[in-house]
């Protein structure tokens, strides 16, 4: 999200590439984004298909996973447009697509962290308030929470829909987020607080409360009975990956609030590194789900056995128990 002054007449197509080698734009960026897009679409597509296809997969954690995978899949659909723009520094897709792609890009980030926050709160309730949560942690209410994260994410990125527009400099059309400097600076600070700092604080508090509850058990029996579990570990790893992938993004955006250092080599390298890392997050999440969720592993094994069963009779007999 790069805000520029609406009165700026500088050719923004050179803002991030003047000091960088041409091979970065001709080879590295297209190849990198192509790999991320293909791997991410396949991974998140499989996750969405498994949860929707198999009725037994509609557990509460899986509904949150479906929420995350759907947002990542939507983001990856728009990634080729962003890849083309970052490669050529030209926008040929029109003003409407500029707004759509910019909005989806921001929406993915906020819906992701809001869903991870909801998952952390859900883990806290399931472990610390187990009796209360049995009556209130229902599939219906979880769906409402997931829908709320989407609504809230859309509300946060409304300025992106409003200020995203195409601009032409010296015959070159680009897609930018154009607004007065003060509004741009305030929006970056506001979204950093709402979309990163506050959710992260909430997640840390939830896990600290869980750890305190587990370590201060009155007996070893209770400590054996209640534990963070694979779902809790999955949420924690997903949060750590989110922080590692998105923290550089926010650091760069906060440092570049002032345009004084936007054309230095360090700022240009930092900009693209932050873009790469934030994109990677969407294709790493399915690997986390597959590693920690036993039901995902069981379904995948079943599908593999089913495919093998069509090759020969012996395979069909071996896979009958899948």
Image (tube, grey):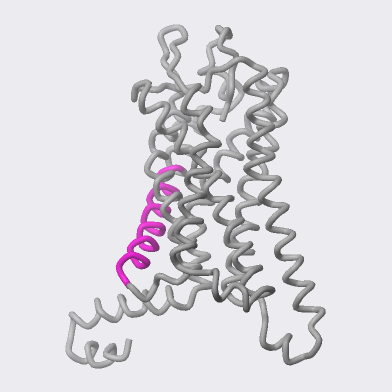
Q: Is residue 68 visible?
A: no
Q: Is residue 29 visible?
A: yes
Q: Is residue 237 depicted above or below 103 in this figure?
A: below
Q: On the image, which quarter does residue 94 sit in? A: top left
Front residue (pair 64, 282): 64
Place of residue 307 in the rendered image (x, y in percent of width and height, measured from the top left): 24, 76
Considering depth in this image, is 53 or 24 the residue closer to the camera? Answer: 53
Report whether 183 appears left or right of 300: right
The quadrant of the picture occupied by the N terminus is: top right
Q: Residue 121, located in which quarter of the rendered image? A: bottom right
Q: Main secondary structure of the magenta part?
A: helix
Between 67 and 242, the residue placed more toward the observer is: 67
Q: Is residue 122 left or right of residue 140?
A: right
Q: Is residue 229 left or right of residue 77?
A: right
* Picture residue at 40% right of the left edge, 59% below the top: 43
Q: Quadrant of the C terminus?
A: bottom left
Residue drawn at the location 56% of the way across and 11% of the way down:
6
Residue 164 position (above or below residue 284):
above
Q: Residue at x 67, y 24 (%)?
A: 185
Q: x, y (%) of residue 254?
A: 70, 31
**54 versus 146 height, above or below:** below
Residue 209 lies in the magenta stretch: no
Instruction: Give percent across and percent down for residue 163.
Output: 50, 21
Residue range in magenta is 33-54
């Amino acid at each position: 999200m790069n805000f520029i002054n609406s009165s700026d007449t500088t050719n923004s197509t050179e803002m991030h590439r003047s000091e960088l080698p041409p091979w970065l734009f001709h080879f590295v960026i297209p190849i990198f984004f192509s790999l991320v897009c293909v791997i991410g679409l396949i991974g998140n597509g499989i996750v969405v298909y498994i949860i929707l296809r198999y009725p037994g997969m509609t557990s509460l954690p899986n509904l949150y996973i479906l929420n995350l995978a759907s947002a990542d899949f939507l983001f990856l659909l728009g990634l080729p447009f962003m890849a083309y723009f970052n490669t050529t520094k030209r926008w040929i897709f029109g003003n409407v697509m500029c707004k759509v792609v910019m909005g989806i890009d921001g929406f993915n980030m906020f819906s992701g962290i809001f869903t991870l926050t909801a998952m952390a709160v859900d883990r806290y309730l399931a472990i610390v308030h187990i009796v209360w949560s049995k009556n209130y942690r229902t599939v219906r209410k979880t769906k409402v929470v997931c829908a709320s994260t989407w609504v809230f994410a859309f509300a946060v990125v409304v300025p992106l829909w409003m200020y995203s527009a195409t601009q032409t400099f010296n015959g070159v059309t680009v897609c930018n987020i154009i607004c007065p400097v003060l509004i741009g600076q305030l929006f970056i600070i506001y979204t950093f607080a709402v979309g990163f700092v506050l959710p992260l604080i909430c997640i840390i508090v939830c896990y600290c409360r869980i750890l305190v509850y587990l370590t201060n058990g009155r007996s070893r029996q209770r400590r054996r009975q209640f534990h963070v579990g694979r779902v809790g570990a999955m949420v924690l790893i997903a949060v750590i990956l989110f922080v590692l992938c998105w923290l550089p993004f926010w650091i760069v955006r906060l440092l570049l609030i002032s345009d004084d250092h936007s054309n230095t080599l360090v700022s240009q390298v930092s900009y693209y590194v932050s873009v790469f890392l934030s994109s990677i997050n969407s294709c790493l999440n399915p690997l986390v789900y597959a590693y920690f969720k036993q039901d995902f592993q069981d379904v995948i094994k079943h599908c593999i056995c089913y495919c093998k069963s069509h090759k020969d009779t012996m395979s069909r007999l071996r896979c009958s128990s899948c």
